[in-house]
Each structure stands twice: as structure tokens, then as C-alpha cells.
Image: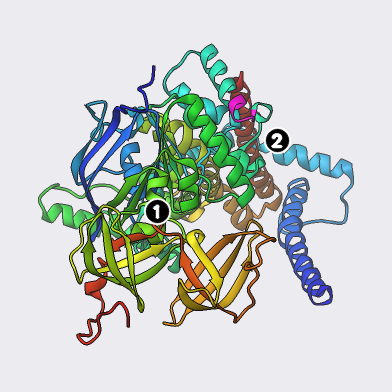
Amino acid sequence: MSLVRNPFKTATLTIIWGWLILLVLAPTLLVVLVSLMPESTGQLNFSDLSPAVLWQGFLSNYGQLISPVYIGVFGHSLWIGLITTVICLVLGYPFAWMISRASPRLQPLLLLLVIIPFWTNSLIRIYALRTLIATRGLLNDVLMSLGLIDAPLRLLYTEEAVIVGLVYMLLPFMILPLYAVFEQLSRATLEAARDLGANGAASFRHIVLPLTMPGIIAGVLLVFLPAMGMFYVSDLLGGSRHPLIGNIIKGQFLEANNWSFGSAISVMLTMIMAFLLLAYYRSVKLFKREATL
Amino acid sequence: MKSSALAPAPLIKLRSISKTFGDRKVLDNLDLDLNDGEFVTLLGPSGCGKTTVLRMIAGFEDPDSGSITLEGGVLHDMPAHERPVNTVFQSYALFPHMNVYDNVAFGLRMEKVAKAEIHERVREALEMVQLAHLSDRRPDQLSGGQQQRVAIARAVVKRPRVLLLDEPLSALDYKLRKQMQNELKRLQRRLGITFVFVTHDQEEALSMSDRVVVMREGGIEQIGTPREVYESPNTLFVARFVGEINQLAAQIIRPLPAGRIEIQVLDKRLELSSHGREYAGGEAVQVLLRPEDMRLKLVDATEGFPARVIERNYKGMTLDTVLELDSGQQMLASEFFDEDDPDFDYRLGERVRVSWVPDWEIILPDDEAPARPVSPASTGAGA
């Protein structure tokens, strides 16, 4: 028994650890390391990594971030990310609830509808969206032929177009984790709340919301961070007037060829996210302590 | 304060309740009274509609037609959260994100009860179920029996008029179930609240209830005390569902004077009590016999039916014997253990005679007879 099981266990653990080290830990550490290296156009110089050099790199790379330009980009990206996340949550939450309460026959079909967009390359889907909302695009044609508008609306290359594109791309990432937590929420739990005197609003506030919070957090994480980084959405739908952090990072890597600064922006983005999460958990703990008093 | 047992006042009245799920009729024109302060059990096989009745009283299902009233006031169109009834769920349905204290306090907080009073009542409820020391625990840190107690405390802390219990003990092991049965009975007596208990376990129903409501396919077969339901079942279904029973097809030959009947049972003509019923000659009936009323005699006895012992099961308190009559039919006899009885120890395969304590039989019209293929040549009973 153990002879059969042990090699399997060893192999599985080795693969998992190998995977984590090689594909998660190593690249992340490399990004952090590169973000600390002095700017070097073209080639990265790994030969001199003394603390003094890294400190120098840290000062220049992260120092650049504290300029009004980049703070503005960060602020704008956070704002776009926030709007996208809120819209995804507002649309995704009731939708996930609906799927989880649908009949067992309908449920796989609804889930399939959520997943189908993944079967098409995301770039192609964004181009499809472009042809829909372009000045001489399908949507304007239909609206004009219906006589609802006289001249084509300017839809493409607006901030709204970027947000629509981001919501379109990221909505499934909100729905799926929410669906998972709604699936766990038993009908009996909700009936118990009603039975004990909770009306719809109270039951939502005290039972549904807290029990689906893990799904909300997972969904927000899966939407908020990518929303700030999806450079091609903002490139293709928003033009280049309001770049997202993703556009700046891409620019540093592919155009300015400044990997160090690109890495520094990337690390900063992760830090902001980590900070937001930490703030959330702190507030929950604080809230709970107050509630029990 | 409570109405006396002699004149029970109906607290909840269900009248002509019908309910259909899809194309399945779950409840069919059901009438039921629940008296103040009694322990009523709804007993029946799964799918008989007993849980639906409970859920309607709780407010989780609406009847298609009919009415439910509580002390004369209409209950059936009141939302679940406003009804003065509470439920103990089969799955307990504790709130996993709250500790024991908050679970129990939830209902009172919804009622906006003052904080000090909530504290007092929650403590009292938890002490009643002996869980005061675990009030900080989360539901997933409790055993099944403890979760069960929290669910009970959470429901009774609201002081409902009626406590609804939906197979609450079905997930517990045998010993714990017995213990909880006793605790629930004690609790009910102490609180004086009407308990409506749903179960498919007839033993549980008999041992706990003031009244048992036996249900079948959306209707009520019989309502009575556990003793009435067990000793005088109204129908074959009740007889078979409540406890073990032996069944012998028989035919009335003729009514006799003084409440007696002449009856053909297998190959014998017997004279039995009519148990107060009117019979016509030729009527097909079933003679029903509880295993504990059966008596085994040595084969040279004159009374009883010849049979062969095919199984003996030692049950501790009783000795169960499976017998095969010469007609091929099997019967179960349950005898109290008595080492001094020389007749007691029968071997497998031994031929014996089986009879029963006179007048302890139940005779019911064979309401299933028309469903059987009728062969015109035989009388059906003695063949």
C-alpha cells in the first residue's frame, strides 16, 4: 500500500513544488530583483548586484514613480479598475445567484454561456467590439436606420468604451468565484434566517453577504488587478489618450526598453493590491471585535 | 394556565389543504388540528407530504388551496419571518460564520430585543441545552449532537407558539438519538410549547408523541395516541407502517351473536371477536397479528397452525422466531426471554404450532383485495 502510494505522493509533491518555484517564485523574485537594478538600455547587467548598486537602482526606479505623470496614471488606472470592478460586481452578483438557483438542467447551460467567450482569443473579441461601436460601426448604423440618432455617436476611443471592454473581458472572472460561494449557500440556511425573523434585507445583510464575502474578494482580486493591466483593451478601445498602468509597463518593456523601471511599476501595482487586501482584512477584524462587544 | 388535556384547544387548524409540485399532488385536501401544548408527530414514508405540511406551517410553502389559521387568525398569507413559529431543520442550518452565541441571539436581534434581555435569554437557552460553556465555538467546531442542541436553542429562544422539527434526529447515531428523544420530550413538557415533529421512524414517533398523525400519499390515514395507532390501526397501511405485523388473509363466514364472528383463516374456521365492527358473510378481511402477541407451542398441541421454524434471532430482551406456515407464508413471533420455559428453545427446522393471544388480533377489511388477480374458483382465504 505505502509502496504504491509513496512514489505517487513524492512525484506529486515534487511537481507542485517544482511548479511553484520555477513558475511562480522565481519569476516574481526576478521581477523584484530587476526593479532594483540600475537602468540599463538593452542588456541587464547581473554581474554587479552589491547592496550599494541595488540601493542606487531602487532610488532611481522607484523615485521616478513619484512624479505627477505616473501618480496621475496610477490614479487614473485605479479609478478605471474601481469602476470596472464595481460594474462587474453589480452585474455578476445577481447573475451568479441566478445560476446557482437555476434548475439542475439549466445550470450547466448558463455556466457554459459564461465560459464560451474564453473559447475565442481575447484580442479578436476586442476587435469585434471595435467593429460594433466604431463611428461607422454596426451599433451606429442600426441606431441611425431606426431614426433614433441623426449623426453617428462617438463611442470608440472613449473612456466608456475602455470600461465596457474591460467589463466584457473580466465579467466571467467575477461570476465564477461568486457562483462557487452561492453554490455553498444552502437553501436551509436562508430559510433558517427567515424562520428566525429576518426579512429579505436583513437576511441579505447578515447571512448572504457575509457568507458570499470570500467569493466577492476573490472576484474583486481577479478583476481589479487585471483591469489596471489590460493594455490592449485601452490601446484598441481608448486610443492612447488615457493610458493604464498596463500600457506604461508594456511601453517600458517593449518600447523604452527600460526593464528596470517597468519592473518597478509592476512591483508597485502588486504592493498596492496587497495593501488594499491587508486594509480589508484589518477592517473586518476590527469590525468583528466591535460587533461582539 | 395551559388548557387541560381533557379539552384541548386547537391552536393551529389546517383546512382542505392541497398542494401540487409540477404534476405531483403532494397534499390532497388535508385537514389537521394541532392542539395547544401537545407533542404531535407526523409519521409517514418519504414522499407522503409530512415535510410539506411542516413547511407550510413555517411559511416556506404556500398551499394551492385551503387555509391555515393560528388561534383563529389567518396564518397562511403571513410571511415566514413574521410567523410566531420556529423550525429545527434536518440539516440544523446553523449560520457557519457566527459562533454559538450569535446563532442563538440572531432571532432576538431580528426582533430588536434589548441587549441585556438578549444576553439573559441566550444564556438561559444555552444552559437549557447544556451548551453554555461552548458559546464562543463556531458550528464547525461542534459535534453533530452539539449542533443539534444549538439548533434547538436557536429556535426555542424566540418562545414560539409552535416548534416545528423536521426529522431533526435522523443524522445522529442510535444512542445519541435515544438520548435526544428524551431530552426533546423533557424540553417540550418544560416549555409547554406545541411541538410538531416530522419523522419516518415509527419507533421514534411512538415513544415521543402525545398524538401521532400517520400520513400516506398526501393524506392522513389515522390520527391517534401512539397506543391507538399501534393497537387499533384503522387501515392495513397504518398496521404495516407502525411496527412489525403479521398478516393473514381471511374471509368472514357469518356474523354470530354477542359481537362474535365466524371466520375462515387458512384451513381453520375460528370464532373471534368482531371488535365492534359489522361484517357481511363472504367479506374478505385481513387478520393482523403483532409479533409479540404470537405464541409458539410444541407440535403436538391442538390449537394453532402448524409451522416450521426457519430462523431464530436473539435480540437480548426478546427472541424472534421466523416461521413458515404450511401455506408457505412467513410469520414473525417475538417472545420475551424466559430460560425456565421448557417450550422456549426451538431448533431450526423444528415443527411447531403457532397461535396468538385471543382477542389481540386486529381484523381489517381487505381494502387491497380488488387489486389482486381474482381467481373465481378459490375463495382466496383458505387456499
Give the magenta part as a residue range. B126-131
**Pointer 2 residue:** A63
Q: Which corner quadrant holds the N terminus of chain A?
A: bottom right
Could you tell me which residue is drawn at 50 percent across and 42 percent down? B93
Give the left or right position of residue B319, taking residue B306 as reference.
Answer: right
Residue A161: x and y, percent? Answer: 36, 48
Label 2: how many Cα within 10 Å (few below 14, some 14–19, many 20+): few
Q: Which residue is mark 1?
A: A168
Q: Earlier in the sequence, mark 2 or mark 1?
A: 2
- Badge 2 amino acid: Gly
Q: Residues within 10 Å of mark 1 (few under 14, many from 20)?
A: some
Check if residue B352 falls in the magenta segment.
no
The chain that hosts pointer 2 is: A
- Front label number (2 vs 1): 1
Q: Could you say where residue B145 lies in the image, as x and y percent from the top left?
A: 61, 42
Which is nearer the eye, A102 or A198?
A198
Rendered location of residue B119, percent (x, y): 56, 17
Q: Is residue B167 visible?
A: no
Please, is residue A95 above or below residue A109 in the view? Answer: above
- Dot 1: what SS? helix
Name the one closer to the observer, B329 or A143: B329
Q: Which residue is the extreme one toward the left?
A: A147
For residue B125, say whether it is visible.
yes
Say above or below: B147 vs B320.
above
User: Badges 2 and 1: C-beta atoms under 8 Å apart?
Assistant: no
